[in-house]
Amino acid sequence: MIKKGLLLVTLLVSQCFVFGQKKYSELTQEDYLEDFDILINIVKNQHPNPYRVISEKDFDKKVASIRKNLEEHPSYATFLLSNPIPYIHDAHSSLSTDTTIFEDFTKETHFFPLATLVFNSKVFVNQHNPYIPPGSIIKSVNGIEASKILSRINVSSDGEIKADDAKDFTFYISLMFPDAKEYVIAYQEGLESEEIKEVTINTVSYFRNFYNVQKSILPLDLITYSYGIYGREVNEDTYILTIKTFAFSEEFAYQKLSAFFEKLNQKGIKNLIIDIRSNGGGLLSNIPLFYSFISKDKVFKNSYRYATKVVDIKVRENLIDGSGRQYSDLDIKNMNNFMLQRYDKSEDDEYYYGNNRLDESYVENYPRDRNVFEGNTILLIDNNTVSAAAYFAALFKENKRGVVIGQETRTCSNFTTASWFINYKLPNTQTIVDLPRSEVFFNNSASKSGACRGVIPDYVVDETMFHAGLVEEKDPELTMALDLIKRQIGLNVAELSKKVTGKKQKK
C-alpha cells in the first residue's frame, strides 16, 4: 500500500529536510531503478518472514515483471504503482511518500474528478457532483473496464485475505493516467439499471481532488477520526461506541472507557454496538483493557507470543529514526542489543521467540472491569480493520461475545506483524519503507508458515443494502445492526408471549 504524504499524520511529518535532495523534476530512470532495487533488498533481508505466503522464486518473478515495466516507463507515478510490498502479503509493511516530492508531483499531475468507494469488487460514485448521480457504478474509464483497473491495484493485506474494498480507486487511477486531460467514464445509475451511460469529465487538480475525497458521502461518522474514540446514544436502549485507534495511553483509554461504561450501566442500556471499522490498530496491551469492559467471564485469556527470523539489523544503509535522522553504528548496535536481550533462539525451529523482558505490560489472565457491560453487543468490522484492532475482533469472536457485522479484517485473526517497526529512506525518491521486526501469534493458534484469514463476520451487508445506504446517506452496517436488535427484541417478545399463553392454557 502507498501512503500519500500529504495525508499522513505520522512520524514522517517531522522528518528532517535533507540538503542536496533531488527535486521531483530531476529524478531519472536510474534513480527509480536504484530505489526499487534497494527496496527489494530491504524486504528480502530485513522483513521478519517475507516468504510466509509466497515463495522466493515466485516473489522474484513478480518483482522482475514490475521492474521491467518501471524501466520501460520511468516516472514517479509508475514508481508508486510498482510497489512490490503487497506480494509478501503483510499488511504492516508499507511505503510512505516524501511530503516534498509528493507535493511537487501533485502540482504537475492531473487527478480523477470523483470520489469513489469500492464494494464487492464494484466502483461506486461516493460524492454529490454535477456529472454522475451518487451511487452510480463505474463500468469503465478511458475504455478500460473498472474490474481490470481494480485488478492492477495492489493493497497490502495478510495471507489470503482479499481486501478489494480497501482499494483507493480514485488515487490509483490518477497514477495510471497522470497526464490525462479528461476521463471518459461509462456508468450505470443503479444496481437495477441496465442502461450504460457515458460522460466525459475534465481532470482536476490535487487541490480539488483532496476536497472531493473529504466531501464523500460515506463514511458518515467523521467526528471519531478527530476524537479517536466517541460514544453516543442511538436510541433509548442502544448506544454505539466508535473506536478508530487503539493507540491511546492506558491512562487516557481507561478514563474514557470507565466514564462511558459507568454511564451505560447507570442508564440501564440494553444494547451496545462497537464500531472498529477503519481502525488502524495500536498497542496490543490496550486490547484486553478495552475488552475487559464487555467480558462475560470474570477472567479471560489474553495470550500472544512474539517471534522473528531476523533478530538483528542486516541492512544498515538508509536506516532512519522517527525524525528522519540516519542511524549511527552505535544506534544500530543498541537496536541489536535490544532485540538480542529480548529474543531467544529456539532449538526446535528457525525462529527467535520473545522472552519475559519483551513486554512488561503483558497480562495473560486478564480480569474484567468493575464497570463491565453485560448487555447485548454487536461488533462492526471491515477491510480496514487491521493489526491490534483485528486482535480485538478475534477476542470478541472467540469468546462469543456477540454478533459480528461487516467485512473480513485485512490482517489475520491469529497473528499479526505489528511490533518494533523500523524505517528506511530510499536515497533518490526519499520514499519511506516501513517494516515490522516481529510476528505476533495470538493464543498460540497461529502456524509459523502458510497463509491465513482475517476475522470473518457473521453477517455481511449485501450490495442492495450498501447501495441503499450510499444513496440515502445511511450507514449500512449500523442499519443492519439496528435491524438485528429489533428482530431480537421481536423474538424475545414472541417467546415471552408463548410462555404466558402456555401458563393460561394450563390453568
Image (cartoon, rainbow, N blue to C red):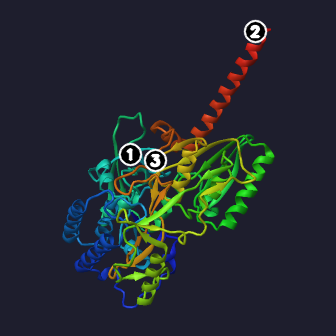
Q: Nearer the viewer, mark 1 or mark 2?
A: 2
Q: Residue at x 46, y 45 (%)?
A: 133
Secondary structure found at label 1: strand
> Is 361 rendered above or below residue 276?
below
* Marks 3/1: CA–CA distance: 17 Å
Please state which amino acid type lies under the numbered disc 1: Lys
Q: Which residue carries the number 3 mark?
A: 408
Instruction: Kindly indicate the quadrant of the structure image that contains residue 286.
Output: bottom right
Please state which amino acid type lies under the numbered disc 2: Gln
Q: Is residue 479 left or right of residue 173?
A: right
Query: Dot 1, crowdedness within 10 Å: few (<14), some or many (≥20)?
Result: some
- The residue closer to the viewer here, 86 or 17, is 86
* Marks 3/2: CA–CA distance: 48 Å
Q: Residue at x 78, y 42 (%)?
A: 268
Q: Residue 54: horizontal and vertical position, in percent? A: 29, 58
Q: Are marks 1 and 2 in contact (CB under 8 Å)?
A: no
Q: Residue at x 48, y 68 (%)?
A: 354
Taking the image as drawn, is residue 373 in sight? yes
Q: Quadrant of the N terminus?
A: bottom left
Q: Which mark is residue 505?
A: 2
Q: Residue 90: horizontal and vertical position, in percent? A: 39, 61
Q: Which residue carries the number 1 mark?
A: 122
- The residue closer to the viewer here, 271 or 298, is 298
Instruction: Tally the marks.
Output: 3
Instruction: Kindly indicate the quadrant of the structure image that contains residue 282.
Output: bottom right
Q: Residue 33: horizontal and vertical position, in percent? A: 24, 75
Mark before the other along the chain sequence, 3 or 2? 3
* Marks 1/2: CA–CA distance: 55 Å
Query: Dot 3, crowdedness within 10 Å: few (<14), some or many (≥20)?
Result: many
